[in-house]
């Protein structure tokens, strides 16, 4: 049994365009390119980890090299598609830029691109983490990219496009994959849990999705770990305990304490979270998300919101609060006294939200000053009389 076990992230990896979650703009463009025969020679997929870059590259390779292809609605049971999924197709070559970053591998690639495909219509090179290639390897690749044979297609994937040469980027069609929204991650995890016969509460799924930060693969790996930890039933406290997360209600309660400047409550909640071994760095990130949501609400409502407690806060106050938290982030992450730095960051955020911006004060004073001279001059005239 142990020999056949496959981790959830691999077992549930997208196999067709319809399986790809949260990247509709990429899927639609690739499908249209295939149906209209407008297939470029090089594609660049950019995005955070676990958002589907390599999976989409493999699906694209299946669409191009399937039997009777290229076609977007290929059959996953087609022998060519199965071979690509298993990594055994002769014409779909995957290169890991992180481990094969030398110029020799790229020179080998330059030699092999000249040969016609052995099985499919195209020879497809998928280079993952392409930004890890050395400068010499980039320059060697550039020559091939400039004038590739018509049967060759390149698909590059990277988490760090800034490190790519502009000359490489300019020769590719670029697609930016976005972090996957929490609700879509929850929806997919529900389907996986149902298929795997695992009972997971909605609150537990929400916590897993929050922890995944927009990465579907991370979310699936976390679910896998929780199944190992809990068995067939997973509840929110289990996820919170394993990963040191703070419950969503507690985060909201702390955000409201910031909004109402309740210093005693802030310290009490931090003490409680620290005593129960919660991750304070993670708590600060989650807290910023809550404050940002309140800020967006204030902007939508014309400048004020009462989302943080019963008090009404302005966009200026929330912006200052968020800015103070962001400034304190590195101290909490890297400082020696994590708890003290966290408390100081929160208290500074409260003070920042209470402070008035000097320019808005000047505007108010100027408005008042505009009214005062008229009243003062009329008083002076009375004295003269």
Image (cartoon, helix red, strand yellow):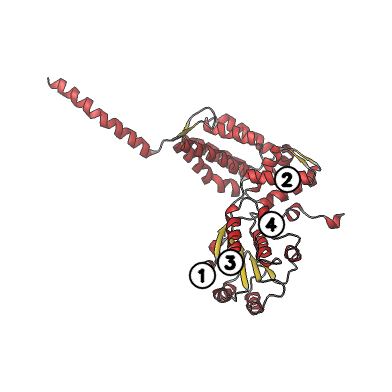
Q: Which residue is mark 3?
A: 39
Q: CA distance from mark 2 to mark 1?
A: 42 Å
Which secondary structure lies at badge 2?
A: helix
Q: Which residue is mark 1?
A: 167
Q: CA distance from mark 4 to mark 2?
A: 16 Å
The nearer-to-camera label among 2 and 3 is: 3
Which secondary structure lies at badge 4?
A: loop
Q: CA distance from mark 2 to mark 3?
A: 33 Å
On screen, 326 above or below 54?
Answer: above
Q: CA distance from mark 1 to mark 4?
A: 31 Å
Q: CA distance from mark 3 to mark 1?
A: 20 Å
Comes first in the chain, label 3 or label 1: 3
Q: Quadrant of the N terminus?
A: bottom right
Where residue 243 appears, as percent x and y from the top left, is 70, 44
Tell me the residue at 60%/48% (across/down): 333
Residue 238 occupies quadrant: top right
Where residue 28 appears, as percent x and y from the top left, is 59, 56
Residue 54 occupies quadrant: bottom right
Q: Are marks 1 and 4 in contact (CB under 8 Å)?
A: no
Tell me the residue at 61%/45% (across/down): 281
Q: Which residue is mark 2?
A: 191
Comes first in the chain, label 1 or label 4: 4
Which secondary structure lies at badge 3?
A: loop
Can residue 258 be seen from the camera position used here? yes
Give the residue at the far left of this rendering: 385
- Which is more toward the observer, 31 or 271? 31
Which secondary structure lies at badge 1?
A: helix
Where residue 10 appears, as percent x and y from the top left, is 74, 56
């Amino acid at each position: 049994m142990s020999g056949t076990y496959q981790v959830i992230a691999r077992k549930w990896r997208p196999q067709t365009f319809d399986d790809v979650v949260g990247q509709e703009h990429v899927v639609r463009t690739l499908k249209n390119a295939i149906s209209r025969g407008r297939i470029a020679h090089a594609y660049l997929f950019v995005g955070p980890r676990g958002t589907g870059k390599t999976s989409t590259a493999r699906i694209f390779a299946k669409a191009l090299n399937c039997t009777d292809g290229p076609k977007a609605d290929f059959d996953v049971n087609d022998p060519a598609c199965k071979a690509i999924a298993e990594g055994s197709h002769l014409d779909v070559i995957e290169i890991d830029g992180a481990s094969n970053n030398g110029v020799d591998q790229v020179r080998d690639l330059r030699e092999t691109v000249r040969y016609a495909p052995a099985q499919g219509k195209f020879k497809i090179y998928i280079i993952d983490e392409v930004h890890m290639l050395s400068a010499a390897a980039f320059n060697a690749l550039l020559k091939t990219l400039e004038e590739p044979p018509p049967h060759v297609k390149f698909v590059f994937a990277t988490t760090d496009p800034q490190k790519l040469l502009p000359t490489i980027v300019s020769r590719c069609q670029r697609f930016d994959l976005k972090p996957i929204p929490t609700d879509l991650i929850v929806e997919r995890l529900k389907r996986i849990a149902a298929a795997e016969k695992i009972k997971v509460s909605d609150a537990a799924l929400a916590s897993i999705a929050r922890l995944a930060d927009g990465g579907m693969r991370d979310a699936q790996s976390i679910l896998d770990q929780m199944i190992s930890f809990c068995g067939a039933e997973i509840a929110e406290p289990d996820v919170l305990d394993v990963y040191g997360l703070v419950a969503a209600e507690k985060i909201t309660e702390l955000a409201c304490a910031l909004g109402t400047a309740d210093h005693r409550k802030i310290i009490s909640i931090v003490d409680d979270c620290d005593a129960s071994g919660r991750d304070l760095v993670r708590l600060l990130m989650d807290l910023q998300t809550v404050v940002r949501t309140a800020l967006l609400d204030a902007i939508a409502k014309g400048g004020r919101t009462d989302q943080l407690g019963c008090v009404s806060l302005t966009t200026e106050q929330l912006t200052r609060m968020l800015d103070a938290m962001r400034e304190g982030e590195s101290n909490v992450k890297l400082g020696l006294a994590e708890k003290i730095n966290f408390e100081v960051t929160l208290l500074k955020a409260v003070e920042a939200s209470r402070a008035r911006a000097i320019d808005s004060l000047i505007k108010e004073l100027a408005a008042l000053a505009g009214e005062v001279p008229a009243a003062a001059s009329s008083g002076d005239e009375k004295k003269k009389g």
